[in-house]
Image (cartoon, rainbow, N blue to C red):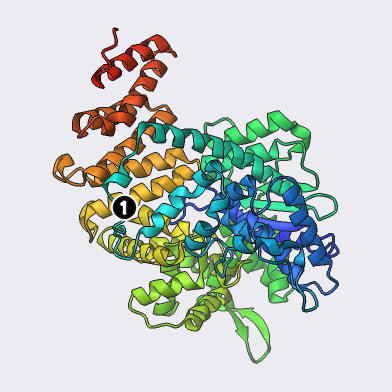
């Protein structure tokens, strides 16, 4: 897939600059580090489109880029995506990476003078991180929050709330018992706003892409890798986008592993693809099976790499193909393995590649049968500090930024400055382990198998649990400084994955973190994931002394869990949570969320028999002293 991504990107560069397609790409993650984070790859792709527009506007000498940027911003305002529009707030709440395009103080500086058109937007300026992935902390969004409608505010309310979690994982004292309690009306309002926000999100994503790919701007190419690991919310947004017949000059390419997604199975991606094809027709969708290279192609690749005739390297080409079946990544790994074992070497006297003829009959034993073993062999030859740096990277994000790794290494006892960390990354690029990303000072593993090899190099058990807890704590601390949401997702995923006895801080603090991330996931319309975090938060408090301790935290966890389970249609689980609240809540006001959902569920479970729902409602009202007849 990396070859496909590179080919698509390079092909886009063949056009003239003014007609060269805007190219945005993203990749979903498999492991616990970033797996399931809502919209992660989509946000990466939209951020890439944004950066290209801004970069060309800054660098283009003929001012064509600045004019293009002006047209795009004009198009965005026409479809309600200006910096003060509700649609713009919804879009930035979900995808902070697009904020520099929507929220700006002045346009690109031209010939020493600024474009005056947008000086009125000064109060709406947000500061971005160096990699352009989101706001730096919550202050900037808080400053412009006064422009937001209630609908738009619901998108990022959870994100701002979690910004009070500090390095010690304690809330600020402002979060008290009264703030924790959620009324029934507020709970239902939050559900309706979440649904409305998600519907609005699909509309604004479509409008954003449409504004970028109008004929007076440039075509758009979007590539999303590893769709088999995409969260369902992302698939829903992509499906809505791709089913639209209003997009022109837009090419979407999605890659996935066909062995993990069968056209007839219940995988969310399979359903999504069938839905798109049935909506737009087979003519608009093309499926391509990307297989390995043919033996002749592998031979040509090795011949070109070693500058030899095919006959001279036939032993090597036959071996490599038999081990790799034409997978180009595996081919490269196999050649590197032969070099490491000195079977294939560069003769500095004759200035040519050679291989040891004496080993011709035994050469088969010098290449492992699986590429993972080859990569592990390569990892063992790395410097110890480089190994540790890449292991920490494998446990963080699919895209690794220098700043995050720098903070992790320093927390791990290494005294590196930022430049030394950059050198480590550059060495890994030279070794073929990492690739430079489109963002400044960011890198990505050159293949999932490489990341998996570093991930698995830490033994399962006590050693890995210690590492997960360490990284979780360190990322929570960094989140308090940067406000980057993915840090909190990753941290909580790691902390939830270890046995509770391995956690080195009070479990009620982990329960709070799960509640915070659940609200973030819910604000991104990923109710299923939010429910998982809420269940984990409840589990953290099971060993505590009932509802006597952490009463307000328990109440908020269960109220949110009730809403999530009911929204998902898990009525039995919702009823169990309702029963827990009704038995333990201290007053009727604290039972209001449970009572409201009890009425709703009683009707839903009985084929929308609202008579049963009304009967349940009367019983509830009687508890409040209304004394209505049944």
Name the residue at 33% across, 29% down. Answer: 574
Name the residue at 39% across, 21% down. Answer: 600
- Callout 1 crowding tier (Cα within 10 Å): few <14, some 14–19, many ≥20: few
Snapshot quadrant of residue 618: top left
- Residue 556 position (above or below residue 622): below
Q: How many numbered circles are shown?
A: 1
Secondary structure at badge 1 equals: loop
Which percent across, then down, holds residue 506? Answer: 21, 56
Which percent across, then down, holds residue 591? Answer: 27, 30
The quarter in which the C terminus is drawn is: top left
Snapshot quadrant of residue 409: bottom left
Which percent across, then down, holds residue 181? Answer: 31, 41
Q: Is residue 73 left or right of residue 595?
A: right
- Residue 410 position (above or below residue 376): below
Which percent across, then down, holds residue 228? Answer: 55, 44
Q: Is residue 248 left or right of residue 196?
A: right
Snapshot quadrant of residue 230: top right
Q: Is residue 455 left or right of residue 323?
A: left
Q: Which residue is mark 1?
A: 175
């Amino acid at each position: 897939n990396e070859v496909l991504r590179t080919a698509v990107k390079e092909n886009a560069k063949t056009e003239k600059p003014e007609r060269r397609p805007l190219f945005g790409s993203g990749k979903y993650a498999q492991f616990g580090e970033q797996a399931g984070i809502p919209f992660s790859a989509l946000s990466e792709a939209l951020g890439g489109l944004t950066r290209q527009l801004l970069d060309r506007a800054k660098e283009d000498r003929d001012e064509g880029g600045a004019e293009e940027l002006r047209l795009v911003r004009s198009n965005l305002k026409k479809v309600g995506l200006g910096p003060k529009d509700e649609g713009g707030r919804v879009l930035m709440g979900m995808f902070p990476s697009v904020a520099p395009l929507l929220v700006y103080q002045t346009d690109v500086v031209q010939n020493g003078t600024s474009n005056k058109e947008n000086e009125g937007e000064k109060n709406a300026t947000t500061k971005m991180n160096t990699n352009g992935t989101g706001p730096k902390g919550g202050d900037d969004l808080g400053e412009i929050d006064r422009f937001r409608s209630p609908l738009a505010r619901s998108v990022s309310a959870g994100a701002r709330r979690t910004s009070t979690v500090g390095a010690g994982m304690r809330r600020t004292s402002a979060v008290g018992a009264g703030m924790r309690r959620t009324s029934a009306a507020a709970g239902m309002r939050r559900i309706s706003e979440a649904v409305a926000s998600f519907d609005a999100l699909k509309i604004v994503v479509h409008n954003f892409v449409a504004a970028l790919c109008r004929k007076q701007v440039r075509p758009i190419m979007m590539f999303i890798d590893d769709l088999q690991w995409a969260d369902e919310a992302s698939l829903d947004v992509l499906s809505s986008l791709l089913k639209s017949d209003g997009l022109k000059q837009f090419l979407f390419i999605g890659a996935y592993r066909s062995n993990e997604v069968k056209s007839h199975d219940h995988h969310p991606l399979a359903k999504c693809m069938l839905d798109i094809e049935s909506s737009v027709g087979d003519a608009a969708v093309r499926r391509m099976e990307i297989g390995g290279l043919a033996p002749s192609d592998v031979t040509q690749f090795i011949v070109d790499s070693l500058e030899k005739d095919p006959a001279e390297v036939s032993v090597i080409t036959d071996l490599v193909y038999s081990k790799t079946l034409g997978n180009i990544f595996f081919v490269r790994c196999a050649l590197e393995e032969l070099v490491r074992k000195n079977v294939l070497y560069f003769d500095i006297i004759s200035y040519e590649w050679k291989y040891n003829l004496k080993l011709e009959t035994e050469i088969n034993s010098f290449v492992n049968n699986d590429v993972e073993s080859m990569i592990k062999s390569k990892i063992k030859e790395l410097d110890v500090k480089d190994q540790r740096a890449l292991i920490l990277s494998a446990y963080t994000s699919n895209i690794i930024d220098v700043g995050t790794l720098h903070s992790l290494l320093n927390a791990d006892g290494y005294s590196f400055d930022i430049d030394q960390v950059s050198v480590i990354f550059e060495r890994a690029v030279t070794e073929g382990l990492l690739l430079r990303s489109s963002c400044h000072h960011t890198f990505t593993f050159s293949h999932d198998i490489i990341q998996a090899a570093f991930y698995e190099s830490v033994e399962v058990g006590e050693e890995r649990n210690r590492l997960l807890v360490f990284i979780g704590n360190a990322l929570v601390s960094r989140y308090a400084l940067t406000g980057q949401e993915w840090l909190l997702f990753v941290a909580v995923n790691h902390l939830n994955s270890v046995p509770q006895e391995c956690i080195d801080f009070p479990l009620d603090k982990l329960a709070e973190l799960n509640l915070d991330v659940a609200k973030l996931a819910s604000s991104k319309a990923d109710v299923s994931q939010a429910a998982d975090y809420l269940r984990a938060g409840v589990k953290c408090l099971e060993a505590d002394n009932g509802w006597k301790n952490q009463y307000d935290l328990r109440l908020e966890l269960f109220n949110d869990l009730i809403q999530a389970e009911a929204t998902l249609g898990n009525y039995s689980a919702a009823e169990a949570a309702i029963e827990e609240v009704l038995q333990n809540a201290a007053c009727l006001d604290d039972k209001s969320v449970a009572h409201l959902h009890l009425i709703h569920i009683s009707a839903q479970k009985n084929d929308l028999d609202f008579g049963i729902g009304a009967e349940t409602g009367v019983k509830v009202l009687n508890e409040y002293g209304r004394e209505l007849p049944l």
